[in-house]
Image (spheres, rainbow, N blue to C red):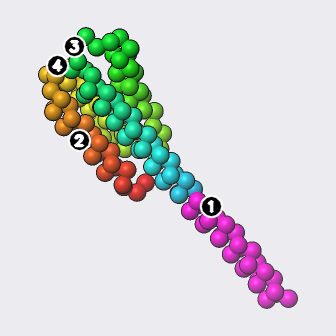
């Protein structure tokens, strides 16, 4: 009787352990998926803003609607940088908000699309590298 009880308790403990490990693995995968999605959203927001700003800021007498769109995309990129949940430590470590603002400020002053592109590419590369790290 005792051996049957030990056998049954072993099965129950084993089942609970398997369930715990499975849930733990699923949670880790879910967090990895959330991080991946946040990095993708960040890259998309920065890319949209970069393309729009680099194309239209140099244009003189830009229509009001286009100017508003450019500023909205710039602001959306900054908001996206600042509202990350699962990658907030990565964003802080990369100092993305300061670097994005500095890149834009420099572009306003020197009007160099090449320099703005260089700074954008550095940000993009740093984000991609951080996204490839495991959480």
Q: Which residue, given by chain and number where applicable, does mark 2 sit on? A: 122
Q: Residue at x 27, y 22 (%)?
A: 56
Q: Residue at x 33, y 45 (%)?
A: 127
Would residue 79 be found to the left or right of residue 31 on screen? left
Determine the secondary structure under disc 2: helix
Image quadrant where one finds the C terminus: bottom left
Q: Position of residue 107 (x, y in %)?
A: 20, 24
What distance separates the C-alpha of mark 3 from that of mark 2?
A: 27 Å
Q: Residue at x 20, y 31 (%)?
A: 116
Of circles 3 and 1, the one toward us is 3
Front residue (pair 25, 4): 25
User: What is the crowding at mark 2: few (fewer than 14 residues within 10 Å), some, or many (at least 20)?
Assistant: few
Would residue 26 be found to the left or right of residue 43 on screen? right
What distance separates the C-alpha of mark 3 from that of mark 4?
A: 15 Å
> Who comes first in sequence, dot 3 or dot 2?
3
Q: Position of residue 13 (x, y in %)?
A: 71, 73
Of circles 3 and 2, the one toward us is 3
State which quadrant residue 19 falls in: bottom right
Q: Which residue, given by chain and number where applicable, does mark 3 sit on? A: 60
Identify whether 115 is placed above or below 109. below
Q: Which disc is residue 109 wearing?
A: 4
Q: Which disc is residue 74 wearing?
A: none
Q: Position of residue 75 (x, y in %)?
A: 38, 23
The magenta region covers 1-26
Of circles 1 and 2, the one toward us is 2
Image quadrant where one finds the N terminus: bottom right
What distance separates the C-alpha of mark 2 from that of mark 4?
A: 19 Å
State which quadrant residue 81 falls in: top left
> Who comes first in sequence, dot 3 or dot 4?
3
Q: Which residue, given by chain and number where applicable, does mark 1 sit on? A: 23
Determine the secondary structure under disc 4: helix
């Amino acid at each position: 009787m005792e051996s049957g009880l030990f056998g049954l308790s072993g099965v129950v403990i084993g089942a609970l352990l398997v369930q715990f490990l499975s849930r733990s693995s699923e949670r880790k995968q879910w967090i990895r998926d959330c991080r991946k999605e946040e990095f993708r959203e960040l890259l998309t927001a920065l890319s949209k803003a970069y393309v729009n700003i680099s194309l239209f800021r140099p244009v003189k007498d830009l229509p009001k609607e286009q100017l508003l769109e450019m500023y909205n995309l710039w602001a959306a990129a900054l908001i996206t940088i600042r509202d990350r949940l699962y990658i907030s430590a990565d964003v802080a470590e990369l100092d993305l908000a300061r670097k994005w603002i500095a890149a834009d400020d420099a572009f306003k002053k020197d009007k160099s699309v090449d320099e703005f592109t260089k700074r954008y590419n550095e940000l993009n590369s740093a984000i991609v590298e951080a996204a490839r790290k495991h959480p």
